Amino acid sequence: MSDVLPWRPRVPAAAVLRHDRARGTDVLLLPERVVVLHGSGRAVLDLCDGSRTVDEIAGLLPAGADTTRVRHEVSSFLHRLRAEGCLR
Amino acid sequence: MTTPPPPWALLSELTHACPLHCGYCSNPLELTRRSQELSASRWADVFRQAAGLGVLHTHLSGGEPLLRRDLADITRSAVDAGLYTQLVTSGDGLSAQRLDALVGAGLHSVQLSVQHADPGRSDEIAGRRSFDAKRAAARLVKGRGLPLGINVVLHRHNLDAVDDLVELAVDWRADRIELANAQFYGWGLLNRSALMPSREQLQEATETVERRRKSLADVLDITWVVPDYFSGTPKPCMGGWGAVSLTVTPDGTVLPCPAAAALPGLDPPNVADRSLRWIWEESAAFNAYRGTAWMPPPCRTCERRTEDFGGCRCQAHALTGDAARTDPACSLSPDHAALVALTGTDGSPQLVPRRPTPPHRPAPAGHERH
Ligand code: SF4
Ligand code: SF4
């Protein structure tokens, strides 16, 4: 269970990550769902292949000065997507 | 006029033909003949135009889309245009071979309709033996690793089975179940009094859904909306008229909503005559009820007007004869009492099964004033 082993987020096979030219943004497409990705959302999801923990994903992003804040934001973004059924 | 934001979704009605005869069908009474259907290459062009406009999702729907022998080609062209595709099917005719062809074409997901959790009752409501085919279809879809949604239109004759329907969805390993209370358009309007649930039925189903949502939070996504004729709160029409999605019917007519074919004087454009961009941005049909300027009182000054957009135009038309009135589902509408009276229907007349042509033309139900 997720309490025992750390979660390794994975974009489900059925999802499509792509650029949306009309809106000038990246999107995650699932049945009945569109998640519009802002900021580093796309970069984060590109790292969600089931092999990395949330901390490892956050660690791979350009953090600038504030690593704690990046870690916190990445974590809440990913957990929110999981709660909505968009991530495994 | 400012350019409206781009649409997100396209409902592609590939054919009106269907092997089932559901009495709640919301397709129009006048069905498009098969000879009038758009060819696969016309659909490919529609998908390219839609994607260019900003559409991200398309439902390949009907009728029963599997009746199109060229469905795999149509699917491939939607995928090639960059659209996320969902097949909306009754399951009737989904053999392993056909599914493989669709998966090969890049199909992303499947939505399967079920009429009841009990096989006999489901077949009865569908007007055809089809439950076993649905179960087999679900197994195939999951076997190919595609996301599966179950869709149930709820009404007096199956609302008591909500618990079993949720169980069925879990059993069939569905990812989602959409419990959609019947809306009264097209054939469904003709059957309104036979479909109308009782308040008690709805109350119980609402509680069941809440309970199941909690217990199945990680397993199954459950969509459920209390029908607006009971809630007193109108639903936003398609997220706003000409705001979120467009529908292309089998003969290429483009509508702001699938039920809008019944609106007189709308004069909807066709892809044969105009570009999808012009239709979306400039046609009179798509601008008729866009935004808030068209609104009558009490909507005009209501603080909810940018949330529900005055409710459903088709429902306003069906119940008052005027599409530009406040949706009678709204408790603030001057026509609300008439709608409430309808929800009290006692007797349970027989469902009239959907047929290719109506048996007789009842005093056009859409035009009566209540
Ligand atoms: S006009 Fe009515 S029927 Fe049509 S989409 Fe809007 S809400 Fe639905
Ligand atoms: S009055 Fe109009 S805008 Fe206000 S809640 Fe009713 S339908 Fe919506």
Image (cartoon, coloured by chain):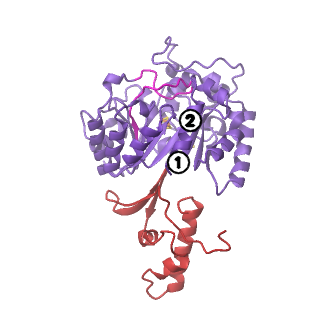
Instruction: In this rendered view, identify the residue nearer to me: B51 or B135.
Output: B135
Picture quarter containing residue A53?
bottom right
Which quarter shows the C terminus of chain B? top right
Q: Quadrant of residue B234?
A: top right
Q: Secondary structure at mark 1?
A: helix
**Disc 2 and disc 1: Cα gap in Å?**
14 Å
Which mark is drawn over residue B134?
2
Membership of B79 in magenta stretch: no
On whether residue B23 falls in the magenta region, the answer is yes
**Left or right: B325 in relation to B216:** left
Label 1 amino acid?
Gly
* Mark 2 secondary-structure assignment: helix
At 55% from the left edge and 45% from the top edge, which residue is drawn?
A: B149
Q: Quick one: label 2, few (<14), some, or many (20+) residues within 10 Å? A: many
Q: In the image, is B45 to the left or to the right of A82?
A: left
What's the mark number on residue B143?
A: 1
Mark 1 burial class by Cα count in 10 Å: few <14, some 14-19, many 20+: few
**Residue at x 63% of width, y 22% of height:** B193
Q: Main secondary structure of the magenta part?
A: loop
- The chain coloured purple is B
CB at mark 1 closer than 8 A to ligand 1?
no
Magenta segment boundaries in residue numbering: B10-31
Measured as percent of width and height from the top left, residue B117 is found at 66, 35
Letter of the red chain: A
Q: Is residue B74 above or below residue B17?
A: below
Q: Are discs 2 and 1 both within one chain?
A: yes
Residue depicted at x 54% and y 69%:
A9
Give residue B291's position: percent from left, percent from top.
Answer: 42, 45
